[in-house]
Amino acid sequence: MSHKHKPVIGIICDAFSRDGKADRLFHGVAEEYIRAIRDGTDCQPLLIPVLTNDVTEADTLCQTLDGILLTGSRTNVHPVYYGGETSKAGTLHDEKRDRTALALIQAALKFKLPVFGICRGFQEINVALGGTLHQNLSDLDGRLDHAKYLDYAQHQQYQDCHEINLTSNGYFHHLLGESRISINSLHYQGVDRLADSLSLEGSADDGTPEAFSLSDNSHFFIATQWHPEWYIDTDPISQALFNAFNNAVHDYAASKLAQSRTNG
C-alpha cells in the first residue's frame, strides 16, 4: 500500500523545566499548534528542539523542512538581541529558543522557506531582521490593553479582544477580503520599530503592529501578533491563513522535489 508523502512543517519548541527543577529541561510545544497543522493543513508537523546555535546548523535543518511555524510562548525574546533595556524582574526568557529561532529565521530567508510566525514568533522575526520591541505596552500612553484576558480561564483567554485595520491592498487584505477584523490578544510586549525588510499588514487602533509580511514578496513569510491557531476548526480567518501557509508549503515541497529530480 502506498502512502501520500506530506510536506513537513517544523514547529519550534520551547525549553522549559518542570516542578521548578531547572537542572532538567524539556522541549515541547502547546498542542493547539500541532492541531492547527494537522487539521488546518495537509502537512506533517515535526517538532524542532531548540538546540540549534548557529546559522550553519539552521541551514542543515531547513533543508529537511518544507515550512516553519514559529509559535507563541509564555517567554519573551531577550532584550540583548535588540538592544533593549534590562527586563523587569519576573520576565520570562528562553535563550535556547532565542538562539534557535533567530538562526532559523535567517536560514529560512536564505532558502526561501515558507514561514508563519505567531505571537512570540511575530516578535522573533522582527528582531531577527533588525527591528525592536516594546517590553511593556502598558507603559505607553494611549495603548489598548493587549493582555486584557491573559489572567482568565484558558477557554476565555482567546476570545476576541479588539479590532485591527488591515493595510489597504496588502497581502492580508487581499487574502481575507476584509479591511478590519476582530482578533484575540494575549501579549504585553509588542513591536516598537518594524524591521526595514518587513511590510506592515495590520495594526490596532492604538498603532500597535499586529501583522506583517516580507516587503519584497519573495516568498510566503508572514506573522501575526494574535493567535489564529486556537480556532482553526471554526474561524474563517484562521482557516484562510493556515490554508495559505499550506499552499505555500506544498508549492515549496513540489519545487524542491522537481529540483532534486533535475539534479539527480
Image (cartoon, rainbow, N blue to C red):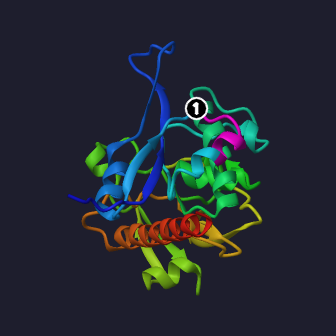
Q: Give coordinates of residue 210: x percent, y percent.
A: 55, 64
Determine the main secondary structure of the stretch shown in magenta.
Answer: helix
Residue 252 in view, yes or no: yes
Name the residue nearer the viewer: 194 or 69: 69
Q: In this view, does 129 lie to the left or right of 12?
A: right
Name the residue nearer the viewer: 61 or 10: 61
**According to the image, label 1 marks what residue?**
51
Q: Which amino acid does label 1 sit on?
A: Leu
- Residue at image position (69%, 52%) is 106
- Residue at image position (55%, 35%) is 50
- 18 up-or-down from 231: above or below: above
Res. 195 image quadrant? bottom right
Q: Which element carries disc 1, helix, strand or loop?
A: loop
The magenta stretch is 52-59
- Residue at image position (62%, 65%) is 263
Outermost residue to the left: 1
Q: Give coordinates of residue 111: x percent, y percent.
A: 65, 60
